[in-house]
Structure formats: structure tokens, C-alpha cells
Amino acid sequence: MKKILMLCLALMMGVGMCAAQKAADKKTVTTVFTTDIDCEHCVKKIMNNVPSLGKGVKDVKVDLPTKEVTVVYDSTKNSDENIVKGFASIKVKAEPKKAGAKK
């Protein structure tokens, strides 16, 4: 009887953890921003000032040749508009890349 009870408890915990992970995944947003950066100094300025982009920022990747910055953040704590304001605070012009936009 104890084995069955422990098995059921372990199964319930596993299901709960999976549901919690799915809920966390829905809150994470990845947005690509087109920017006006043109040198390695600009890249360093962004990477050294990630907290300026706002709360909930989990990852920032800068691609200098395409002038794009990819930001992964928690949508319950931040938004694209706030991140654009964060870029402006470090004097970088940015806007979310339009879906389907071509170079």
C-alpha cells in the first residue's frame, strides 16, 4: 500500500512540474529589434547596460553585421515598448523587427 501511495505522489509531482514549466514557457518572449548600431563600441554599450532594458530580461544577443539585437524576456515583467525605451536611455535607436520583413 505504501508503494502505491508513493508512486501516486511521485506521479502527481511530475505532472505538476510539467504544467509549471509550460506556464513559464508562455511568459517568455523573444523579440528581434533593428537598431542603429554600427561599431563594436555600440555592442559593448548594449551588453554593459542590459539592466537598462528593464526587468525580466533573460538574454540579449547582438548581431553587428545585421544591426539586430535579440532580447528574450518575461512578458509579465516587460514589453517591447519598455525595451525600446531602455535602448533610448542608452542612446540606441531601436524598434521591433516586423514579421516577414526582408533586407
Image (spheres, grey):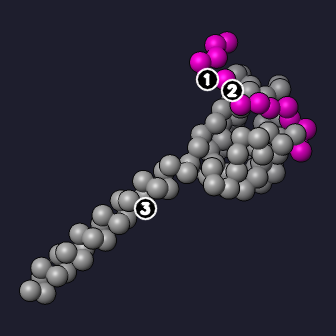
Which amino acid does the dot numbered 2 rest on? Lys
Q: Which residue is found at the position 27% from the left and 70% from the top?
A: 12
Image vertical order of residue 31 relative to residue 72, above or below: above
Look at the numbered discs 2 and 3 and tell me whether their residues touch, using CB distance below 8 Å: no
Residue assigned mark 1: 99
Q: Residue furthest bottom?
A: 2
Can I make out residue 16 in this image?
Answer: yes
The residue pinned by badge 3 equals: 20
Mark 1 and mark 2: Cα distance apart in space: 6 Å
Location of the C terminus by quadrant is top right
Separation of marks 2 and 3 at Cα, in angstroms: 30 Å
Nearer to the camera, 26 or 73: 26
Q: Is residue 19 above or below residue 52?
A: below
Pointer 1 with pointer 3, Cβ within 8 A: no
Does dot 1 land on a helix, a strand or a loop?
A: loop
For image coordinates 68% across by 26% down, the residue present is 97
Residue pictured at 23% horizontal, 69% vertical: 11
Q: Amino acid at mark 3?
A: Ala
10 Å crowding of disc 3: few (<14), some (14-19), many (20+)? few
Circle 2 residue = 97
| Residue 95 lies in the magenta-colored region | yes
Give percent across and percent down for residue 66. Answer: 70, 22
Which residues are the magenta region?
Answer: 89-103
- Disc 2 crowd, CA 10 A, few/some/many (<14, 14-19, 20+): some
Asked if disc 1 and disc 2 are in contact, CB closer than 8 Å, the reply is yes
Look at the numbered disc 2 and give the secondary structure of its residue: loop
Q: Quadrant of the N terminus?
A: bottom left
Horizontally, residue 66 falls left or right of residue 1, namely: right
